[in-house]
Image: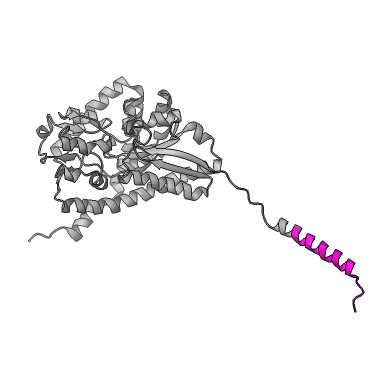
Amino acid sequence: MSTTSPTQRRRFLKKAATSAATAGALATPMIATAQTTALRFQSTWPAKDIFHEYANDFAKKVNDMAGGKLKIEVLPAGAVVPAFQLLEAVNKGTLDGGHGVVAYHYGKNSALALWGSGPAFGMDPNMVLAWHNYGGGKALLEEIYKSINMDVVSYLYGPMPTQPLGWFKKPVAKVADLKGLKFRTVGLSVDIFTALGTAVNPLPGGEIVPALDRGLIDAAEFNNASSDRALGFQDVAKNCMLQSFHQSGEQFEILFNKGKYNALATELKAIIDYAVQAASADMSWKAIDRNTKDYEELKKAGVKFYKTPDAILRAQLEAWDKIVATKSSENALFKKVIESQKAFAQAAGQWQSDYMVDFKMAYNHYFAKKKG
């Protein structure tokens, strides 16, 4: 029979409850509510373009990994500023960041177009990215931005497939067929097509098809089967010339206002860095899948595809050589980028040529029609 009084029992139970509460508090970590940093981005692409989808894909990867600490919202072209004014808007802080291509800044320094325009000494787009990240390109881009007082942080990613020569009212058989055409392109491709005899109008993506429809331009290039189909090229032209050296190694650019970027925690900067790499791989895989499907849909819509004649491709290379010589004599940074690309391309191109098997041989083995 217990001799503990009711008062003693109450004191004991109170003490036990207090001890349990203290132990529970020590066992449960304190949960701090992290404040969300919101960044407003704009792309240089219409909302319906797969390129804008790529921009959103990158933002989603960042947002998912940041766990509520960072949120990037991406607006389509024109929501805040016109597509070609993205760099200035990010620099000034009108936008926190953006998604586009380096060639769109061509007017500020012609060297900027070398990340995309021209044959890149035979490098494919993934090799151009290799040069950028490991061959000195990144430091050169930063040097150019500094020279034009653009206080931004730039990430390049997403190797684009080779772009078509363009969309035409009738097929192009020789260089002379290009002469006099009112043609849309951008970057140093303006110089290439001008040398081939066209009258160039560097329109942003969302304005191309309306201009073709109204006869303001006769022909145009944009980028790939998915983008071209989404923009409606098949509704205004039925002939597309495939393969070209005017933009055979292009990639995307993700821009941050440097002040906004520098204010981010180290862990968030790391998330951005790895999100860029993940988005680059994902974009290249998605492009293969979607471009394949949209290529077939364009054929069903009555579009005729032709290989660009070798004579035109050779003329592009000859025109490019003259452009490079002229720009290099006018712009020390242009010359510096060209020399860096050439040195990397000579070694990397030899490696790729020696090591890579001819995949077309295997494809033809299985799918080409047998003669006889």
The majority secondary structure of the magenta stretch comes to: helix
Residue 56 or residue 33, whichever sits in front: 33
Residue 41 among magenta residues: no
Residue 371 or residue 46, whichever sits in front: 46
Q: Quadrant of the C terminus?
A: bottom left
Residue 12 lies, with reference to residue 236, above or below; the image says below
What x and y, as percent, mark residue 308?
Answer: 15, 41
What x and y, as percent, mark residue 138?
Answer: 41, 34
What x and y, as percent, mark residue 139?
Answer: 43, 32
Give the image quarter of residue 156. Answer: top left
Q: Is residue 20 left or right of residue 224?
A: right
Residue 36 or residue 359, whichever sits in front: 36
Residue drawn at x 35%, y 34% is 102
Residue 124 lies, with reference to residue 336, above or below; the image says below
What x and y, as percent, mark residue 275?
Answer: 45, 46
User: Which span of residues is magenta-colored?
Assistant: 1-21
Q: Is residue 138 visible?
A: yes
Q: Residue furthest top?
A: 330
Q: Residue furthest right?
A: 3
Number of numbered tags placed on the structure image:
0
Colouring scheme, one of rainbow, by chain, secondary structure, one colour: one colour
Q: Is residue 256 left or right of residue 188?
A: right
Give the image quarter of residue 21. Answer: bottom right
Residue 147 lies, with reference to residue 2, above or below; the image says above
Residue 137 lies, with reference to residue 365, above or below; the image says above
Residue drawn at x 21%, y 37% is 210
Q: Residue furthest left?
A: 372
Q: Is residue 155 visible?
A: no
Residue 4 among magenta residues: yes
